[in-house]
Amino acid sequence: MTNSQDLRQQLQENCELLQTKILYLEKEKIVNADPIRGFQLEQEIKKLRVQLKELKQQIEELEQASATVSQREVTGENLNSALTPGIAIPLMHILHLSDLHFGTTDEAYNWYDQIAQDLYSELNCEKLDALILSGDIANKSIPQEYEAAKHFLNNLCQEFQLQPENIVMVPGNHDLNWKIAEAAYTLVRRKDYTESLDENYIIDKGEYIEVVDQEKYKQRFTHFSKFYQDIKGEPYPLEYDQQATLHHFPKQNLLILGLNSAWQLDHHYRSRAGINACALTKVLTQIRRNQDYKNCVKIAVWHHPLNSAFEDRIKDAGFMERLAQAGFRFALHGHIHKAENSLYSYDVTTSGRKLNIICAGTFGAPIREWVPGYPLQYNLLKLEGNKLTVNTRRREELNGAWKPDARWLMGAGRNPLPYYEMEL
């Protein structure tokens, strides 16, 4: 064991001792009725927390230094690697939530406290470097639901030092307003309609047809766009060919691409999920021409799955080939209300280009929409050096606490784990 490893181990042991002492003092504070002693305990706990924070900072600095050294040893043999020798990925925590289905501010208040306690106490995560919301932030895409979501995000930013520019959001099928979509259709007599009958935008009802007004139709994302602006400082684009957003993290050599897989959905077409080809073309051209993105680890995010037993999946998977060619390494999505992982291989060789697909479960869907065997779930991604670790969490009781979600099989005779790891 190297000197660096010895020091890191000693610091971690000291952290554990401090955490144990803090827990003991907190319990004493609860049962002690003496206000003077309670104040003394509170002050002692605060001092220990400061010491704990300093120790964790030292550990993080050691890990970053170690990541730099290990990354310099990476060779160019793996064609899939987005890195080159000398490029380091420092420690980074990314919170991945999906299918939040916010309803009220009371929900937002309770849900925030539950996840904050889990991040802080169980996962030792006091700082988030990024947040990814892979769709269905709202339930009916109305302003009240997005107000609840803003309350949740504001608390998360404040306590976990999360910057709004480091929040990545894409819409899901619940982030488009169906009433606005319905209002975009006009009932017309078939014999009075003189233009072409485009089956993508015409609903045939025999003697009458429903014709969509394209400009009004785009407005079904308007409430999501306003929410996006409140958080990010700019509206989410309503033009379909602009619905590909880039989020660059230069210090971490990371690039995240957000795509809208719900751009063709409405109350008539509930399963028409897909990625807009023009939006993808524009953003891949932008990535290719920007040298700052060349050596980044690349992650793509959208809402709908490629593989599902149901019809509301992405059936045209051609965009995955283009993402693989462009050097994307991971893809994140939601929608199916259960945590899963799968692999898309573009080159069928061991070192070929591939995307690991990471699906988060539902963070806040009502019980009637839970998949049997899959409670509420979320993912915490830890990116460091040349490895991505996905921690999965579960919550089985509406007013309960989050716990490890040990569902990842490790082989015959071995217990499943609440996380899985992947090489960059």
Image: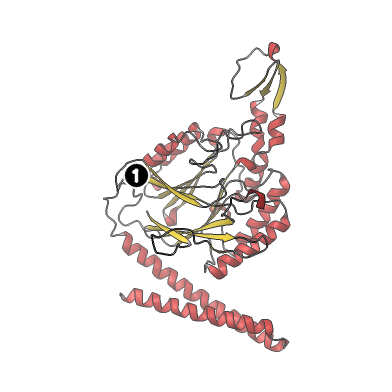
Q: Position of residue 267 (x, y in %)?
A: 66, 33
Horizontal side of 281 relative to 28 (left or right) equals left
For the point 32% across and 41% down, which residue is it? 347
249 or 11: nearer the viewer:
11
Look at the image and tell me whether residue 200 can be seen: yes
The answer to whether 315 is drawn above or below residue 255 in the figure is above
Q: Position of residue 321 (x, y in %)?
A: 40, 37
The answer to whether 60 is drawn above or below residue 209 in the figure is below
Look at the image and tell me whether residue 366 can be seen: no
180 or 40: nearer the viewer:
180
Q: How is the image coloured?
A: secondary structure
The residue at which mark 1 appears reads as: 353
The answer to whether 357 is drawn above or below residue 267 in the figure is below
Q: Which type of secondary structure does the marked residue at label 1 adopt?
A: loop
Estimate how packed mark 1 is, as few (under 14), some (14 to 19) or many (20 or more) residues with alpha carbons within 10 Å: many
For the point 39% across and 75% down, which residue is it? 8
The answer to whether 356 is drawn above or below residue 57 in the figure is above
Q: Position of residue 138 (x, y in %)?
A: 66, 47
Query: Label 1 is placed on what type of residue?
Result: Arg
For the point 60% across and 15% down, which residue is it? 196
Residue 238: quarter of image: top right
Q: Quadrant of the N terminus?
A: bottom left
193 or 153: nearer the viewer:
193
How many numbered discs, if any?
1
Residue 376: quarter of image: bottom right
Horizontal side of 230 relative to 335 (left or right) equals right
Q: Position of residue 95 (x, y in %)?
A: 53, 57
Residue 269: quarter of image: top right
